[in-house]
């Protein structure tokens, strides 16, 4: 199972330094293309996407969040910090498992 990062240049470069392949995107069309590419590759089990890029294709991303099928989608903040009003990873985990960590 492989990871795949979709995000801005800094995120893709950073993850690339540890061997994670990905695509740099700047707009809706590029985000949609990169996400579909990741979905088509059966070796990719985890898609890491920056929150701001995920916002560009929110309906598509939401179809795969918290589902029982692969790939697993993980949203991360970009270098400018988290998007306001979004749950953090800890809050999402608490919601998903039903207990407070």
Image: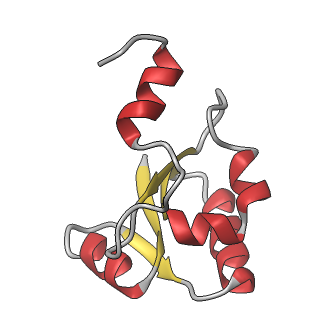
The mark total stands at 0
Residue at image coords 49%, 58%: 84
Question: Which residue is most to the left?
Answer: 18
Residue nearest the observer in this picture, 29 or 76: 76
Residue nearest the observer in this picture, 11 or 88: 88
- Indicate the quadrant containing the C terminus: top left, top right, bottom left or bottom right: top left
- Residue 34 position in % (x across, y down): 63, 74
Taking 3 as reference, is 42 left or right? right
Taking 77 as reference, is 60 left or right? right
Residue nearest the observer in this picture, 52 or 5: 52
Coloring basis for residues: secondary structure
Question: Which residue is most to the front?
Answer: 85
**Residue 100 lies in what quarter of the image?**
top left
Residue at image coords 69%, 43%: 64
Residue at image coords 66%, 58%: 39
- Residue 48 position in % (x across, y down): 46, 58
Residue 6 higher or lower than 60, as above or below: below
Residue 46 higher or lower than 83, as above or below: above
**Residue 22 lies in what quarter of the image?**
bottom left
- Residue 20 position in % (x across, y down): 33, 66
């Amino acid at each position: 199972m492989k990871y795949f990062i979709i995000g801005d240049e800094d995120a893709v470069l950073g993850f690339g330094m540890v061997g994670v392949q990905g695509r740099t995107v700047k707009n809706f069309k590029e985000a949609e293309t990169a996400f579909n590419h990741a979905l088509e590759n059966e070796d990719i089990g985890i898609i890491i996407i920056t929150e701001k890029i995920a916002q560009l294709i929110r309906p598509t991303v939401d179809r795969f969040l918290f589902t029982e099928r692969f790939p697993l989608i993980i949203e991360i903040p970009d270098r400018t910090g988290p998007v306001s009003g979004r749950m953090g990873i800890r809050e999402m985990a608490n919601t998903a498992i039903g207990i407070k960590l």
